[in-house]
Amino acid sequence: MKVNMKLFYNLQEIILVCKKDELNLREGEKMERYKVSNECVGCRACVSVAENNFGIKNSLAYVKKQPLTKEEESLCQNALKVCPVNAISKVDEINQANVVVTSSNTEGLSWDKKKEGFYVIDAREINHDPFDVIMKKAYEIKEDDGFVLIQRFEPYPIINMLSEMGFKYETVKKSNDEFRIYFYKKLNDKVEEQKNNSKVDVVIQSATPVAHPVIMKLLQSERIKKAINIKELKVWKDTEKHLAWITNRKADISFSAIITAAKLKNSDIKIPALFVWDNFVLLSRKKIKGFEDLVGEKIYAPLFEEAPPAKITKYLIKASGLNPDDFNFVYGKPFGRPEQIYKDFVEHKADNVILREPEASYAIKIMQDRKEDISVISYNKLWNKVNPGFGMFPNAGVIFKGEFVKEHPNIAKMFTEELKKAIEWIKNNRQEAVKLSFDVMQQPENRVELFLNRVNFQYIEGNQLVEKVKQYFDILNKNGIADVKIDKEFIEMFKLGV
């Protein structure tokens, strides 16, 4: 028999390659496995060390291949060590046969066969706050149907909130890095249906993550649960979009910045209380005392040039005897998003930034963990330097649709009372507030804790609010930051009138 030697040698080479791969796979069976948490800031350090095992997707790192050789394992271990935010860790494998039901409230329900066909939301693959996605699906679900939420941990705040919305749930722990929460919307009996029909349907929206802990606490209020049926809860990532819901009267209750909301006084709204004050800071990698040390430097600002953060900053610069034109303000396209600005800061892409809370605290905590010194200057300090004795200056509060207040005055009043209680509870129970809101805010507990320790939550209403707002807008109007007529109609906007 004549042998094709070329084919023979090719086959030998294939066999040798296969043997090598087999050896690598056997070796890989003993290799450590790695994962990347949502603490990642996309700095690419892991990719530069172990490019065959780590990659970047949507500006965040991920494991594209587990190590199969000792060399790859060593590189992955180095990637773990160089990660500046400790986002890389080893996977603690669990025998899949040992799946554990960790918690449930499904007594008396038989939906085991149905649950495996539920719609799946894998929050681990969502690179932004999944709260809005989860809530949208929750509101879409009909009775006797459900959905599955996959998360890296058991998300107690979401579970508690959806339980109050009539969902039964079961949490199954597949591994230390995979929890499957099955949510089922039970069929209402006639008594329960009559109770729900007596409630008022309400649409709530928030334009700022600073309000997340407050909203989560409000959703626990027994008084609110008895009086209100939350028809929709929208948390905007693109904050400017919430204005349309106010002007077209889709939102009954909104959480928004006061300067933005005040422009809509002709839209029949009420702003009976503010609870967020002194919300902006200037962060710099340099050792600075104020803007005078940043002349000629780039300053990354949120939103756009004509937005309140930039206009107030330029006013403070000018009032300090400096020329705003001597600074190079940088805005995103089409808008400077706070979440991107803080990432650029911690990734050394921006040296000087203007940030609101909670992103300011996230950035500060990351830099603290890296032991990198930065300058943190509060806008309260800058504001009071040019307006001595002014005290805290207003940022955000609650907005009611005027029609809602007229039709349901007692509910509006009750809501503000519960809002005040929620603010006081958060101030007095920081640790519990962290656990209530950290997964909704998609940040580690230590960053949320720093945020709650730094943020200035003060519930102000009535005549005290009116005087503060008048004083604030007088300054804004005189310096071309705002153009709001302070008349009787404007003043009445800050009174609930019930």
Image (tube, rainbow, N blue to C red):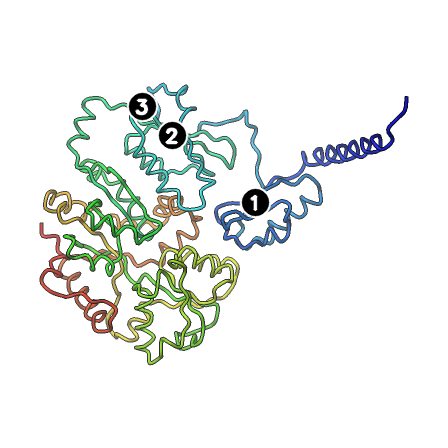
C-alpha distance separating marks 1 and 2: 29 Å
Residue linked to disc 1: 89
Res. 29 image quadrant? top right
Residue underneath mark 3 = 144
Amino acid found under the numbered disc labelled 3: Asp
- Quarter of the image where one finds residue 391: bottom left
Q: Which of pointers 3 and 1 lies earlier in the amino acid sequence?
A: 1
The nearer-to-camera label among 3 and 1 is 3
Tag 2: amino acid? Phe
- Which residue is found at the position 62% from the left and 44% from the top? 53
Q: Which residue is mark 2?
A: 147
Rendered view: 147 above or below 257: above
Q: Is residue 417 left or right of residue 361?
A: left
Task: Name the spot of residue 436 as percent of width and height, x first.
Answer: 35, 44
Q: Hey, what amino acid is under mark 1?
A: Ser
Q: Is residue 349 above or below residue 134?
A: below
Mark 3 lies on a secondary structure that is loop
Camera-side mark, 1 or 2: 2
Q: Are marks 1 and 2 in contact (CB under 8 Å)?
A: no
- How packed mark 1 is, by other alpha carbons closer than 10 Å (few <14, some 14-19, many 20 or more), is some
Instruction: From the top left corner, tell me how far across and down residue 38 is, in percent.
Output: 48, 46
